[in-house]
Amino acid sequence: LTMLDVPRHPDGESVREAVSTAIRNVDQATRDRFVQAVGEWGTRLEGASSRYGVVGFCWGGSTVFAHAVAAPAALGAVVVYYGGSPAPADSALKALGRTYETHFFEGAGHGFTRSQDGRDGANREAVKRAWPLTVAWFRTHLGG
């Protein structure tokens, strides 16, 4: 499927653009409710932990960062990959007594997990370092 094949609305906007716009316009409180609902559903599955963890990339990273500040009771951990944080978020996490770490990977660019061959290998090296940190974070904060 090429961009030329993407269906368009009568106003000329592609379906992809329309969906992106609609998603960007969902307010954080609604995003929190959806993330929490899915997380709590997962905790009710057989063999699941009583707390959930979530990873967010880009816009999703920003979403889960804000979700960490909201911190519903069943939320155990989040990992943010190249998502923006609200300006007061670090201080909000500190005030709430939340544990957090920040990692930067030299030379890696936005979207390094999907574009691993980019930046003269820096993206692949970032993935090799970031993913084990992600798994370790969840093991530490969710158990298992």
Image (cartoon, rainbow, N blue to C red):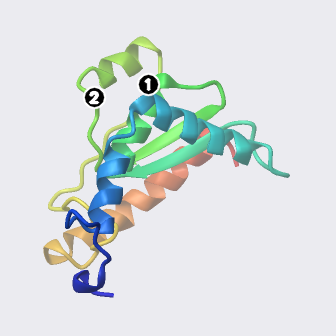
Crowding near pointer 1: few (<14 within 10 Å), some, many (20+)? Answer: some
Task: Answer left or right for 56 relative to 46.
Answer: left
Residue 42 on image: x %, y %: 71, 48
Residue 59 seen from this side: no
Residue 10 x %, y %: 26, 66
Q: Quadrant of residue 18?
A: bottom left
Residue that badge 2 annotates: 86
Q: Alpha-carbon neighbours of circle 2 within 10 Å: few (<14), some, or many (≥20)?
A: few
Q: Which mark is residue 69?
A: 1
Residue 104 position in % (x across, y down): 24, 49
Residue at the location (32% across, 45% down)? 24
State the image coordinates of residue 9 (x, y, percent, origin top left).
29, 66
Left or right of residue 25, residue 117 in this image: left
Q: Residue type at mark 1: give it.
A: Val
- Answer yes or no: do the residues labelled 1 and 2 have beta carbons within 8 Å? yes
Residue 60 visible? The answer is yes
Which amino acid is tagged 2? Answer: Pro
- Closer-to-camera residue (111/121): 111
Q: Is residue 27 above or below residue 87?
A: below
Point 37% across, 49% down: residue: 23
Residue shown at 26% from the left, 68% from the top? 14
Camera-nearest residue between 41 and 1: 1
> In the rendered image, which quarter is residue 103 located in?
top left
Q: Name the secondary structure under disc 2.
A: loop
State which quadrant residue 57 falls in.
bottom left
